[in-house]
Each structure stands twice: as structure tokens, then as C-alpha cells.
Amino acid sequence: MLCQGAIPIEQQRQPFEKSMNKTLLIASMALALAACGGGGGDDDGPAPQPATSAAEGLYTGKTSANQDIAGLVLDDGTYYVIYTSLAPISLGVIQGKLNATNGTFSSNDGKDFSVTSRGIFDVAINGTYATKGNLNGTVRYPATGQTATFTSTYDKNYELAPSLTTLAGTYSGTSVIPEGGESATITVSTSGAISGAGASGCRIDGTAKPRARGNAYDITVTFGPSPCARAGQKMSGVAYYSAEDRSLIAAGTTADRSAGVLFVGTR
């Protein structure tokens, strides 16, 4: 969340929706920066979920490095946090799983998938939470010793019920991996089937399924053959749809988390 990237989101009257638009802008800018730098499901029902985490929710906030953040902590403790900033430009996703109990949480398996730094970095996170209130803590990069603190507040949009009927549509935006990205279009059907293509001709196919708890969707996508930079790779993750501005943000990783992908688009 420092030089290696971080998720920003401004604290406004509709924080998550505003951040979605900002993330799309920064994704496009990061894509341009990278270019300059060179080289389906069958039903609409929710998937079964394990025991819930007391820290689950949708959160928006800011880091001590002046980065905006927006993230999901799922009911099983898995989290995805998108970070962005305009000056300097930074964009990436931090993913891992946290343990939360009695108002404190920790995560020792975090990965920072940094688009602007074109790499994946180990992170450890610990802090405090108030259920349906806030999530605050410190992110540490063991390899460098760098740290950043963050504060975030709970967004009640997490309590809305996800639906494939709501999610269905075609989204135009930007798809990025740590090594770079491109403009892309993704279509989600009412059955949960995902299909998409990037400007390079790279195609993806997959599925989306509403989660049993929380306003989010489990997604799985598989990249097609060349010219896909991740040809044949399968990635799984989570998606969030903002009805207010008709925006979709989705992030996923390979099973071993050696690669990740972020898509931000609107319909």
C-alpha cells in the first residue's frame, strides 16, 4: 500500500460508488503508464458458505500514504482490497484471509498484486474492527519492513441481496494484471455465464454465482489461448456490482496466487 500500491476510496456521500468511478479512471491511467513503461452457472441461487467472520463487510477508507481503499471481507474471512491514488498513480489489489475475534484481526498470508509496480508482494495485516462499524489496521511488507496504516468504515450496501438478474449485462472497462492491462468488455448472462474479450483479442469464459451472505458474487474465469498473457490459466475470486452507477469490479487469483486479475467497468 506504499510504493507497491494501495487501494484508495474518497470519503463522500456515496463512497463506494464514487470510488468505483475513480478506480476505473485510475485503471485507465495505470494502463497508459504501463504501456509507456514497455515490456456458467445454472441458477440464480447463492452458493453455500462456511461459518461467518465477525469482520465481514464492505469497507471504504484511506491509508496513511494518502491512498483510497475499498474492500470486501467475506463471511469466511477472505478479503479483497483495491487501492488507488492519483498522485502518484497507484493501483492494485491486496488479497488474503483474516482471522477476527474479540475486536482484533490478523492476516499473515496477504498478497499485494500491484499493477503500478508490476509485481506481487507478501504482506501481513493486523488491526481492530467493530462489527458493521469499522476496520482499521497496519499493513506491513516483510521483505522491506515498510508499513502503512489504514482506517475504513462499513458500507450498508453489503447487506443488499445479490442477484444474477441484477448483475446480468455487458460491461466495458479495463482489465489489468500486475504486468499490464488493456481495455476489455465482459458480458454476464442471467444464468451466470461470463464471457469477455480484450483489445488484444484475448478471450475469457467463466461463471458468476451470488454468495449466500453479503452483496457479492463468487466468480471463476479461464483465459483463452494466445494472445492471452495468462493463456489457459484459471482464476477465482469475487465481484461487486454497484446499482447506483451500474459499475462492476471483479478481482481474482490463481489457486497458488502466483497471478491475479482486476476488471473495472460500467454498462
Image: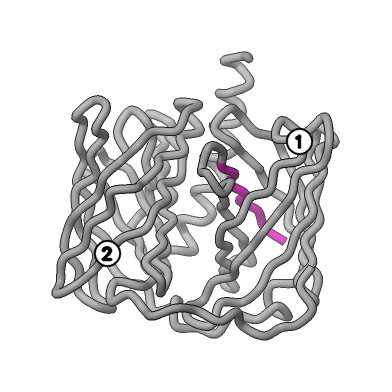
Q: Quadrant of the C terminus?
A: bottom right
Name the secondary structure under disc 2. Answer: strand
Identified by mark 2, the residue type is Asn
What percent of the width, then of the height, locates residue 223? 75, 44
N-terminal-most mark, 2 or 1: 2
The residue lying at 39 percent from left, 53 percent from top is 96
Q: Is residue 266 above or below residue 261?
A: below
User: Which of 96 and 116 lies nearest the eye of the viewer?
Assistant: 96
Q: Is residue 266 above or below residue 94?
A: below
Crowding at dot 2, Cα within 10 Å, few <14 / some 14-19 / many 20+, comes out as: some
Residue at which label 1 appears: 231
The residue lying at 42 percent from left, 42 percent from top is 84
The residue lying at 81 percent from left, 56 percent from top is 195
The residue range painted magenta reads 260-267
The residue lying at 58 percent from left, 46 percent from top is 254
Residue at which label 2 appears: 99
